Structures are given as structure tokens and as C-alpha cells.
Image: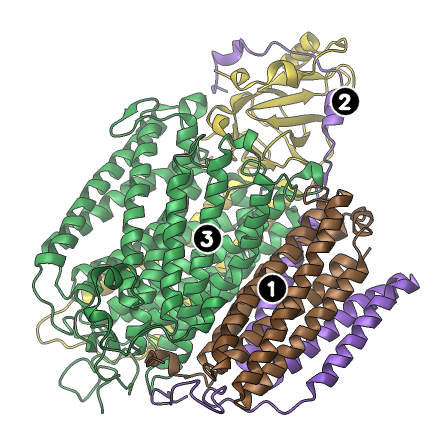
Chain colours: A yellow, B green, C brown, D purple
Amino acid sequence: MLLHLPSASTYSGDVDGLVLWVTLLTGFWFFAAEGMFFWLMWRFRARPGVKSQYITGKEPHLKQWINVPHTIILVFDVIIIVMAVRVWVKVKQTMPPADDTVRIVSEQWAWTFEHSGADGKIDTGDDVWTSDTLHVEVNKTYHFMLQSKDVIHSFFVPVFRLKQDAIPGRTISGWFKPTKTGTYDILCAEICGIGHGIMGGEIVIETPEQHALWVSQHSVVADAGATAADSTTTPAGAKN
Amino acid sequence: MAEIAHEHGHLPAGHGHAESNWFIKYLWSTDHKVISLQYMFTGMFMAMIAGFMAYVFRMQIAYPGMNVPFFGHVSPGAYNSLITNHGSIMVFWVAMPVLLAGFGNFLIPLMCGCDDMVFPRINRLSYQLFFISAVVLIVSWFVPGGGFGGAWTAYPPLSAVGKYNLTPMGSSLWVLAVALEFVAFLLGGINFIVTAMNARAPGMKAFDVPLAVWMIVVASLLFMASVGPLIAGAVMLLFDQNLGTGFYNPTRGGDPVLWQHLFWFFGHPEVYVVLLPAMGIVAEVITVFSRKKMFGYKTVIYTVVATGVLSFFVWAHHQFVAGIDPRMANVFTVTTVIISIPIAEMCFLYIATLYGGSITFTTPMLWALAFIAEFLIGGVTGIYLGASGADIFFHDTYFVVAHFHYTFYPIAIIGTLAGITFWFPKIFGKMMNETMGKIHFWGTIIPFNFIFIPMFFLGMEGEHRRIYDYTNFPDLANPWAVSMRITSTVALVVMLLFQFIFLFNFIYSMLRGPKAEKNPWKSNTLEWTADSPPPHGNWREMPTVYRGPYEYATPGRETDYWPQDERA
Amino acid sequence: MSVKTIATQRASMNIPTGRLAVWWVLVSEIVIFGGVLVSYLMHRLGHPEWGEQAAYTNMWIGATNTFVLLTSSLSAVLAHQAAEKGDGPKAARLLYLTVLGGLTFLVIKSFEWTHEIREGFVLQSGGFWSYYYTAAGLHAFHVMAGMGVILWVANDAKKNQELHRVENVGIYWHFVDIVWIFLFPLLYIAK
Amino acid sequence: MTSTAHAPAHGTAHGSAHGPGDAHAPHRNYVRIWGILCALLVVSVVGPMLGIRWVMLITAFGVALVKAYMVAKNFMHLDIEKPIVHWILLVALALMVLLYGALAPDVQKGEGSGWKKDAGFHHSFVTSKPHEAGEHEKPENAEHGKP
């Protein structure tokens, strides 16, 4: 949990843990360096009659003050790398089996979400298209397929600690598993034109009952008609 | 190429330009000192514009929808073009011209003991191209549609397609200006490198060269080696914008990610292109005012070279979540975190230089010390972003904004001010006012931290960048976040107001300041053996070098400094 | 001629200043052309279908132009030889030949492009054609720049002045030649 | 590494094509080298006519490398140039190799771990029959942000 930001996905804790560890490891060096720095400034301030010393930096007893930290930093770096890569692989490179799938289509300046609907399969007649609001069920693993219709956008859910850019011409897959019910922001984290400042959405994480109810209300085999994109996702269509 | 051939720029050293008219003397001169001043003043002028832009959009963020004094209502389009041009200007038209070209032009010939750059006329051409690029950029704000608003990284398709960015002319002019600026600095860079390699004073070996020159030269090398692909990419982007090609258009076989790579392949070394000159300036200042030899002069150079080499292997950490293959991210995490080692060692060596010194806290020294203290913050927060796992969350949040301002601000503002206050006596032959200098220092440093520390916390709250009004996002509109935004905006306004003290001090000292003698700081390097200000041609007879640049408090001498050109 | 900047006459690296500068120019040119060619190579390998577009380029014209550039390089290096012997006028004559070669190259290229554009293959006709015109155009631009400098150096050389520049412009011209040596198979042969 | 500030000005007379410490180019038969280059050119033109792919690649690109090497060595006199020049040119070339190596996985490949290129995804987007859910009133706004 970073500051006040709730953590609502299975890996948000890992990211926060990594941030904490980086804080500890780099914080140590930061305060060590600054402390030494200010102490030297005070200790060796100009005083009448005191001449500065002639030090080349080759003296072993002084050089160790560089070499030892140098080595320890290397060790710290290795620790940070290992932890960072482990989190990265968990979030971005492994795809746990999915309970459900959702397609996320970004465009200037709105999100369109394709829920799999009652049958739990995407690209079938009963899919539910929504604009700017994503309905998911808590404690279920979701795969998402991220696409963009025009420029680069970025699907950012702070409470999930999840961010992924949407590149036009590519379908980028990822996953998340909500652990906490509630309604949170979905942000576009890549500048995408004058509407970037209003391009937001919200993710509604529901209990199984609420979700089932919502699906039953909305998931009906619609007759062929205008696509969700055409009918709803204008800049004005973005929330408030 | 044409320029390479005229090596024989101008009249004999010492005479010639002195008696020629004002226009030749100040606008058409091939004298490296005049060109350096042209770069510095252009940079300072652009800095004022970019500072004003920062004021406008910070006001809009803190008080959404208000009528900003001296600007008016900030529309979303205007906001985007303000942040875009603020970033572009601060990097390309302030940091580079002042630190690299300004100080490079002034210091390299003076510190290497030659009468001018090896190609004075290319030098003039380089400034003229740079000046044109600045004009083109300014024009781009006033064309139909307004200035480019696609962020300084200019990712296509947003930057490539007029119907997406709504500023077709502005974007083309922006790309054109940046490309021109690159060519200008390529010409300047060749001049710097060749001058420092080939035109050193008799007896000056590679390891007798002051760190400032070393670092400016390495910076020019980094720039020259990294910018090429982006120049090509900029041409392709111009074609996409104006001729309807599809280099970056996925539906026509192109690839938007290509631009990101070409941009950051240059963009990351660029960070070190501006960092190193500032580091070099700081090295000169702290050695002089702690009366100390640089702690491990050669080690510093090795760390600089190591940083330069590594900087070519880290660029994709700007793209971890930008659609590149996740497997690549692991490689770039390793290289990115590893580059912290030479940088950290460099900082340690600077800190160690204070050991056993006799430190006087003059204004330049305050700036130099502040550079190290603040840059450390920027350095450690970089690790968060280099660690791919954490970058998933931090990417494009205000944490990033705070981080790179904690690196760029010390570089472009603090380092520059250290250099200006330090060499002011040499540049203008007048001393600056210490009292005003110290007031300006504290009035800048304290608000600076109040501007950017809140941004770290906002970033941790998930506040994303380049948003003109956070009331659109319920989670980000909470009172705490609002108070944070207002804090940093108020601090910014305070800091900007304090800059007028500097301006006054600068102009007043330039005109009315007390006369400066040759070597007011009792420094060793060659530029202090010339008159202040140095005449055209710098020396009546060229200096010869007998020792390294940092011989302070050498045992067995009554004076605590030993100029490089003083015969033993 | 006027007395020169002292800095310009020094050579701490034991390489004449002008030549050292030309080498650095080549470094910056290598990365510029490298950017285009690397991008082209990746897209070309990533899109086999571009081969069909490439099939329309005329290998014979490309080969002729390669021959022309190689020959102009020969006269450039012979000019350098003459300059070393201090025979300015001869160097100048050979440099004029080099410029003539560059001119021939451009004339052939303009006919080639006119033909292709008539056929309907323009900059926008497809990925391959975009890179084809951009890369070859960038190269042609360097040819023109080189011709200008060479003419200007030749006029000095005629008066036995600045003979060391003959070598410098030669080095640049050979580089332009080398770039074409790689453009030829990339754009004309690989189908 | 001593400077030559007092060296005579360039370009005054014979031999002036040489900077300090510059070795005389060995006298090569440039015409012969030119002949070899032309012969190689013929090879690279004939190669593709055999219609065998690997032969074509070798004759086209292998020969191009040889030609470039010969021009650089004999015409640009890189063989008698100072080592540092070799180094800076090699570094520039190495950087381009690095650029290719790092970009190819994203730009050249059509798909990778978790992503694939599909310029025509609009197709799947339009054909599927969507259902418009009335999301604009947003009843849940009341307890927004409160889990």
C-alpha cells in the first residue's frame, strides 16, 4: 500500500514490496552520502591558519572509502535487479489460466470494453460492450487484449499497479486478478491529443452476485446494429 | 561538409576583429568567446520563455480553469503545447546551448591554451543554424492550429497524423526545428572534439586537460554517436506528416515503436550529454574553493567514459510498458541499474574531494555543492524507474516528472549558475555581487525542493502526467492531492520571482561591477592566465603547460596553487 | 593568403586537423545512414511481401551508377596522389573529373526516378518505395553536397593552394561511394 | 604529442598535403584496384541471375563488403591511418549493430511474448455484435472510490 493508494490486485503487493525494498536500499546510500557530504563541508570549512592537504586519491587508506562502497553498491544493485525482474516476470511475462477475458479498445478519447457476457466467451453474440466502465468480478483471473484504434494510449489502473501502452496495429495481452471490491479510476497514461485530460474510465470490481446480476441485465443477444464504438465513444462520451 | 574545408577562419590572432564594426564584432564574429555568449544569451532567453510556460501550466494544474495572470484561460490544446514546448526548450534550447555550446565554446580553447576553435567559421555557422532552429520553434507556436502538443517525445501516430494532433503545421515545424538544432550541434561537436584532441597547448597531455573539457568532449562524442538515427527518424517523421508516407503507420507496414526506439536511442545518451558538462563545471568549482586536488582525477575520467559507454545500452527503460517485448525489458533493467555504479562512484569522488580541504562558501561553491546534494536525489530515484517491476507503476506518473527534474534542474539551472557565477569575472571582466548571489541561491534552492518533492508523493498516488485538469479523475481529486499541487505551484512562483534578483545582479555587475583581476579565485587552469576578459586571440604569446590542472596545496610551495603554465 | 588560427595548425594527435575532422564527420554520417538502413533492413526482413515491390527496380541502372561512382572515386584518389606530388593543376583537373562523375550519377538517377514515377511508383506507393526514395535521396543529397565542396577545393588546388584539402574531400567522396556500394544490393539486387 | 604551433602554414607549396607526422601514402596502382572493383561489380550483377538464393546473397552482400573494404583501405588510406581513426569508425559501426539487435525483436518480428501485430483488428471489432449498456448515468458514482 503506497501512501493512501489501496492495493486491489494479486500483484499490487509485489510492486509495493519492490518499491519498499528499493527505498530501503537506495535510501541507505542516499543518507550515507548526504551525511558524509555535509559533515565534510562542516569539518573542512576554511579556518584561519589551516591549509588544505595535498591528497591525490591514490592513498590506499582513503581510496578504500571509494572502493568499498563501490562494491557494496554492486551487491545492492544485484539484489534490486533480481527483485525487479521477478516482479516484472510475474506481471508481464506469465499468463495464469484465465477465468474470463475482456477486450479493451482505446481511441481518442475513450475506452471501450468488450465483456464476454453470459457464456463467458469473447467475440460471441452475447458480449457486453460498455464505454468507459469495466465490470469485473473479484478474485477471478482476467486476461485482457489491449488494442488502439488511432494513437498510442496507456491502460493504467493505479490500484492494480498495472500499466500497459496500447499500440495501434498491435494486440497486447496481459492479465490481472482483482482482490478487492469497489470502484476505481482507469487512467490513460500516454498523451493522446487534446482529450488526454478527460480520457478516463472506471473499473467496477463486484462480488460474484453483483456481477452475475449485472451480466444478466446487460448480456442479451443484440440485433446487428451500430457498434459500441460508433454509438458511444465520442470525447463527450467520456465520464463527466 | 563544405565547412570542414575552410580551416582558415580569420585574421591573425590578437588583431583584426578588435577594430571591426559592432555587427562583425557581436553578430558575425568567429571568435569563440563571442559565439559562446551568443549561445548563452539565446539559451537564457529561451529559459525565460520556458519558465513562463511552466508558470502557466502549473497555475492551471493547481487552480483548474482559472484565468492565469499574463496568459488567460488555458485550453486543453494550449496546455499540451505548453508542456511539450517547455520540455523541448529546456532540453534542446537551454541545457544544450548553455552547458554544451556556451561553456564548451568559452572553455575549450581557453583551457586548452589555443587562440580559437580549430574551425572558427563552422563555429559561427553552428550558432547561426541553432538560432534559426530557435526561430522556427517560436514561429511554430503562432501558426494555425497552434504549437505542437504531442509531448517532447513526439510519439507517432499522434505526432505524425494531423487529424490526431490537430496541429499539423505546428508539429512539422517542431520536428524541423529539432532536426536543425541537431545539425547545429553536430557541427559544434566536431569543432569541440577536434579542438580538444588536436589543438592543445604545447606540453598539455591528455591527462593534463581539466575535467570540464574532458566531460564536454565526451558529451559531444555521445551526442554525435547517438543522434544520427534520430535525424534519419525525424526526416521520416516529416515525410509521414507532409508527404503521406507510412514509416510509422501500422496499417501501411510501418511501426510506431520504431520511432520510440530511434528517439530514446538518442534520448538517453542525451541525458548524459547535458549531465557531463555540468559535472565538469562542478569539478572545477569545488577543487578551486576547497583548494584541493581532484580526488582521483583519472578515476573520474574512467567513470565518465564508463558512463558514456553504458549510456548506449539503457535506452529502452523509457519504454518498459510502451509495447516493447517484455523479454527485452529484463536486459535493459540490468544495464540501467548497473549504470548507477559509475555515476555513484563519480559522486563519491566529488564528495571525497572535500576531504582535507579548506572550503570557502562563495556563491559559485554554494551552487556546486547544491548540485551534488540535489543530483543525488535525482540519482537514487532513478533506480525506482530502472527497476522494471516498479516502473510498471511509476511510468508516466509524476514520480517520473519529479525524478528527471531532480536530475535536469541541477544540471541545467544549478550547474549552469555555478559556471556563470564562477567564470563571470573571466567572461565580462567584472565581479558579481556576492550578497545578491547568496540571496538568489537560497531563494532558488529552497523553493526548488518544495516544487518537486510533492510530485514524488503525487506520483506514488498514481497521478499521471500531462493532464490539464485532475477533477476529471475522482481518485486524484482528493483534497490532499489538491493541496500538494498548490504547494508546488506556489513554490514555483516564488522561485521564479527570485530569478529577477539574478537577472538584476547579472546585468548590474556586467555594467557596474568592480573590475576583476586576471585570477580572482587563485585557480590553476589556463583560462585564468589570460586577461579578463580575454582579448581576441586570448593570449599575446601562447601558454605552455607544465603540469596537471589541480595542483593545489602542493607540498613545499608557499602559495597554495600552481598554475599549469608556470615554469617549475 | 591570410595567416591562420594557431589552433588550426596544431596536431597533438599527429593527424592533420582537417583530416581528423573529416573522420569525425564520417562517424556522424555513418550513424545517420545507419539509422535509415537499419530501419529499412528490419522492415524488409519483417515484410517478405516488399520483395514484389523491389522487383520493379532496375538492377542495370543501379550497376551503371555503381560503376560511375567507383570511377569518380578513382579520379578523386588520383587527384590526392597528384596533390601529394604538389601538382595542383593536375589535382584540380582530376577533381573536375570526379565532379563530372557525380553529375553523371545524378543525371542517370533522375532518368531512373522519372521512369519509375511514370510507372506510378512514388514515395507513397508502399513501404519499400518510401525507404527506396528516402535512402537513395539522402545519398543523392550527399553526392550534391560533395560535388559543391570538391569544385570549391579544386579551384584552390588549381592555384596550388590548400592542397591538403584534396585528400579531405577525397575521403568524404569515397565514403559516399561506400554508402552506395551497400545501397546497390539493398535496393536493387535483393528481391 | 608535441604541438606544432610554429609549423609552417599549410598549402604553400610542394608536400603541403601532409600534416605533421603524416606518413606518405605508399604508391599504389590505383587503376588496378579500380579494375578489381569493377570486376567485383560484374560478379555482384551476375550472381543473382543464377537464381540461387544463397549465391545471390553472397555475391550481393559478401561482394559489397569486399568492395567497401578495398575502397576504405586503398582509396581512403585507412591502412596507414592512425589506429584511433579505426577505433572511432568501428565504434560507430558497432553502435548500428547494437541498434539493429535491440530493435529487431520489436520492429522486425510480427509477434512476441504477449503481443502480436495485426493492422486489421478493426475487422474483428466491427463484425462482433455489440450490446450497448447504459453506463452513462453511473449509479455507482455515489460510493465511488469507497471499497
Q: Can residue D32 be seen in this view?
A: yes
Q: What residue type is labelled 3?
A: Leu
User: Which kind of residue does numbered mark 1 sit on?
Assistant: Val
Residue assigned mark 1? C143
Q: Which residue is identified by label 2?
A: A123
At 65% from the left edge and 17% from the top edge, which residue is drawn? Answer: A230
Q: What x and y, as percent, mark residue B429? A: 15, 66
Tell me which corner region of the image, top left, top right, bottom left or bottom right, holds residue B345.
bottom left
Foreground: disc 2 or disc 3: 3
Q: Distance between the residues labelled 3 and 1?
A: 20 Å
Disc sitting over residue B180 in the figure: 3
Q: What element carries label 2?
A: loop
Viewer-nearest residue: C23 or A4: C23
Q: Nearer the viewer, mark 3 or mark 1?
A: 1
How would you rate the neighbour count of disc 1 (Cα within 10 Å): few for under 14, some for 14-19, many for 20 or more? many
Element marked by disc 3 = helix
Are there few (<14), some (14-19), or many (20+) residues within 10 Å of tag 2?
Answer: many
